């Protein structure tokens, strides 16, 4: 797994607060684990969870030290999968060193099929300082307004308002975003240096610690 040393290599700002999104009855679960291959939906049939996304972690960047693992999984569940600090069902069998769960907000209908395999995912785990949430939302909206009309831009797929964690102190959020292809991501970053600078300023102002995991979906 590569650790990215270029400060602006993959930086993007993604932040959602309880004031910014509608509460969801669904529970989102994000887990990291190590294995040679992924899991199937049938493995979750008795857990009340559906398999939303999974794949391989290929690089990471940030100042938050997450457990080392080579795979991720994102689940949409009817109820909590962490109980008393431990994991239920298949998650326990995976011996996942990191499991995060909380309110799930799907920001678009998750696609399936071959188009997904061409994407490049960025999975952000973050702790916010919460000094000024209103200012954070204003800054985030300003970045979003600039990004929205651009070519090769990233897309927000889902957000988890984390309430429970195993393996780390409970963070504020998990956000999954993607570029349509890795080439789209490279062009976007090469052609939009001013946005990377805006994002860097956002992160310095509002975050305590964070990590971006760069992932290839199955």
Image: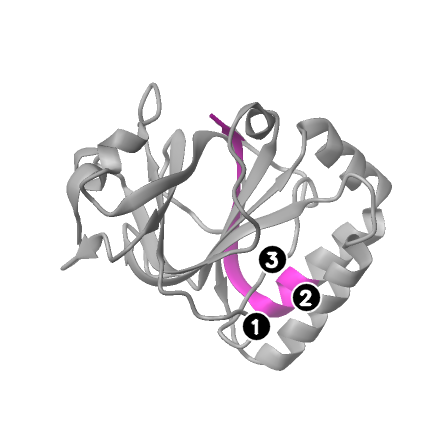
Q: Is residue 182 above or below residue 123?
A: above
Which tag, 1 or 3, sits closer to the chain's start? Answer: 3
Residue at figure coordinates x 55%, y 65% from the top left: 16
| Labelled pair 2, 1 in contact (Cβ < 8 Å) | yes
Left or right: 187 as drawn, with respect to 116? right
The answer to whether residue 153 is above or below residue 85 is: above
Ranked by sequence position, the earlier of labels 3 and 2 is: 3
Residue at disc 2, secondary structure = helix
Q: CA distance from mark 2 to mark 1?
A: 11 Å
Residue at point 69% right, 44% down? 154
Element marked by disc 3: loop
Identify the residue position indicated by label 1 in the image: 20
Q: Are marks 3 and 2 in contact (CB under 8 Å)?
A: yes
Q: Which mark is residue 14?
A: 3
Residue 156 picture location, percent across and down: 61, 50
* Mark 1 element type: loop
Q: Which residue is identified by label 2? A: 140
Any magenta on residue 209?
Answer: yes
| Residue 43: mark in rendering | none
Please give the range of residues in magenta: 202-218
Q: Counting residues from the N terminus, which is met first, the one under dot 2 or under dot 1?
A: 1
């Amino acid at each position: 797994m590569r650790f990215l040393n270029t400060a602006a290599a993959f930086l993007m700002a993604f932040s959602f607060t309880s004031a910014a999104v509608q509460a969801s009855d669904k529970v989102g679960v994000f887990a990291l684990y190590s294995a040679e291959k992924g899991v199937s939906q049938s493995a979750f049939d008795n857990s009340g969870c559906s398999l939303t996304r999974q794949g391989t972690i290929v690089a990471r960047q940030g100042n938050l030290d997450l457990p080392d693992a080579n795979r991720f999984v994102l689940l949409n569940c009817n109820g909590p999968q962490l109980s008393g600090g431990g994991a239920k069902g298949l998650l326990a069998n995976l011996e996942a060193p990191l499991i995060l769960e909380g309110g799930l907000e799907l920001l678009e209908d998750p696609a399936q099929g071959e188009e997904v395999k061409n994407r490049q995912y960025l999975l952000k785990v973050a702790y916010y300082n919460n000094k000024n949430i209103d200012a954070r939302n204003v800054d985030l909206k300003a970045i979003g307004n600039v990004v929205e009309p651009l070519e090769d831009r990233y897309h927000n797929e889902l957000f988890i308002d984390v309430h429970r964690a195993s393996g780390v102190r409970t963070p504020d959020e998990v956000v999954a975003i993607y570029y349509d292809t890795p080439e789209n991501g490279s062009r976007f970053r090469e052609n939009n240096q001013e946005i990377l600078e805006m994002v860097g300023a956002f992160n310095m102002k509002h975050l305590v610690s964070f990590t971006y995991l760069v992932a290839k979906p199955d």
